[in-house]
Amino acid sequence: MSRALILGGTGLIGRAVARRLLDAGWDVDVTGRDPEHMPAGLAAAGARFVAAERADARALRSALGKGCDLLVDCICYTAAEARLLLPLAGDATSTVLISSRAVYADADGNHSNSAVPPRFDGPVRETQPTLAPGDMDYRSREGYGPNKVAAEHVCLDSGLPITVMRPSRVHGVGAARPREWVFVKRVLDGRGAVLLARRGAGVVHTTAAANIASLVETVATKPGARVLNCADPDAPSALEIARIIARHLGHTWAEVLLDESAPENLGRTPWDSPHPVVLDTSAAAALGYRPAGDYATTAAAEIDWLVEAARTGDPAGILPAADDEYFRRFGDYAAEDAFLAARQH
C-alpha cells in the first residue's frame, strides 16, 4: 500500500488531499498541533493523526519514519520552513509544496496583495514573473507573497522531485476564511437584494480543495521538479458565484449591479477585482490532471457546511465573527438599504 504524509493535514487543503488518497486506497498520516482538530471523518476513514509542530525538525522526522511515497506540505510559508522540508523530501518518492497565486506580479510589479490590483495580459502561466523572494513577516499583506517565493526557490533549487503548486482563492469544507460566507450569510439573513460592485463582473479564479487533491494524486505517481497552477475548470465572476450560492440554497433576490457612480465600498465581494485574474492550468492537464468538478459542484459541500454551522449555533467556531476585519467590508446592510431607498425617490 502506498503511504502519504501530509504536513498540516487537518486544514482545508490537507483534509481534502487526505480524503482523496484514502478513497484511492492510500495509507495516510496527517500532522497537526492538536488532535482535537482532526476531522472525525478522516479518522473514521483510516487516516492517522501525528502530533508535530511544523518548525520541529525532530517531530517531522519522526512522523516521516523510514520514508513515504508522497509527502505533501500544506503549511510551508517561509524559506526556513522549506529548508526543514528538504531532508524529508529526500526520503519521499514525490513531494508537493502548496504555494499560492499570490506570488505572481504583473508588468508593473503589482500583485494580489499590493495597493494597486494586478493587471495581467491574459491567463497567468507558470512562467509569469513572480515577486522577489523576501523574509519579512509572512502573515502581513506585504510579506506573504515574497515569503512564498523564497520557499519555492529553496525547493526548486534543491534538485529534488518537488512539485510547487499554485492555487487561487481556495474554497471547501474546513476553510479558515470561508469566502462563500459573504453570500451564504446574506441568504440566511433573508436579504431580498444582492448589491455587486463593478456589475458583478469581477473574476478572481477559484480553486476547490478537492481539485488540489486531484492534482496532488496526479503528481504522486509522476514525481518531478516543476511548478503547476491549480484552479477550477471554470472561472466564475462574482455575479455567477452569487447566483450559484443562491440557487443552491433555493433563494431568490434582486440583483443590483453597481457601476462607478455607486459609493466606493458598496457591493464589494472577495472576487470583485477590477481586472480578471485567471490561471492557465494547461501544464497540469498535460500531466493527466482531471478536476474533481467545476465551481458549482465543488462549492456545494462548503455551502452546506456553513449553513449547518449557522443552524446549530456554530459549536466548532468556524463562522467569521461579526467584527472580523476581513468580512466586515462585505455586509454593510445599513448602507445598502440607504442606497436602495434613495434610488426609489
Image: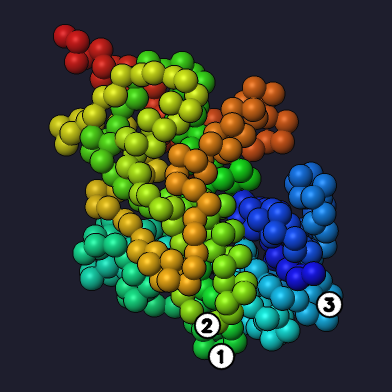
The quarter of the image holding the N terminus is: bottom right
Quadrant housing residue 76:
bottom right
Q: Position of residue 131 (x, y in %)?
A: 37, 73
Pick the front one: 310 or 340: 310
User: Looking at the picture, how far across and down is residue 248, in whole percent?
Assistant: 48, 28
Q: Report if the CB atoms under discs 3 and 1 are less than 8 Å apart.
A: no
The quadrant the C terminus occupies is top left
Q: Amino acid at mark 1?
A: Gly
Given residues 325 and 81, the one toward you in this image is 81
Residue 65 shows which numbered tag? 3
Residue bearing mark 1: 159
The residue tagged 2 is 225
In this rendering, the answer to whether 242 lies above or below 171 is above
In-front residue for pair 129/140: 129
Is residue 188 visible to the viewer in this orientation of the structure? yes
Q: Residues within 10 Å of mark 3 (few under 14, many from 20)?
A: few
Q: Mark 3 or 1 closer to N-term? A: 3
Task: Examine the rendered structure and indicate whether residue 70 appears above or below residue 212.
Answer: below
Report which quarter residue 245 is drawn in.
Answer: top left
Q: CA distance from mark 1 to mark 2?
A: 7 Å
Bin the neighbour count of mark 1 within 10 Å (Cα to Cα): few under 14, some 14-19, many 20 and up: few
Residue count near mark 2 (Cα–Cα under 10 Å), binned few <14, some 14–19, many ≥20: some
At 79% from the left and 44% from the top, the residue drawn is 40
Residue 113 is situated, as x and y percent measured from the top left of the image, at 38, 58
Q: Is residue 300 left or right of residue 259?
A: right
Q: Are marks 1 and 2 in contact (CB under 8 Å)?
A: yes
CA gap between label 3 and label 1 equals: 22 Å
What amino acid is found at the position of numbered circle 3 in the picture? Gly
Q: Residue drawn at (41%, 53%), measured in percent from left and top?
A: 233
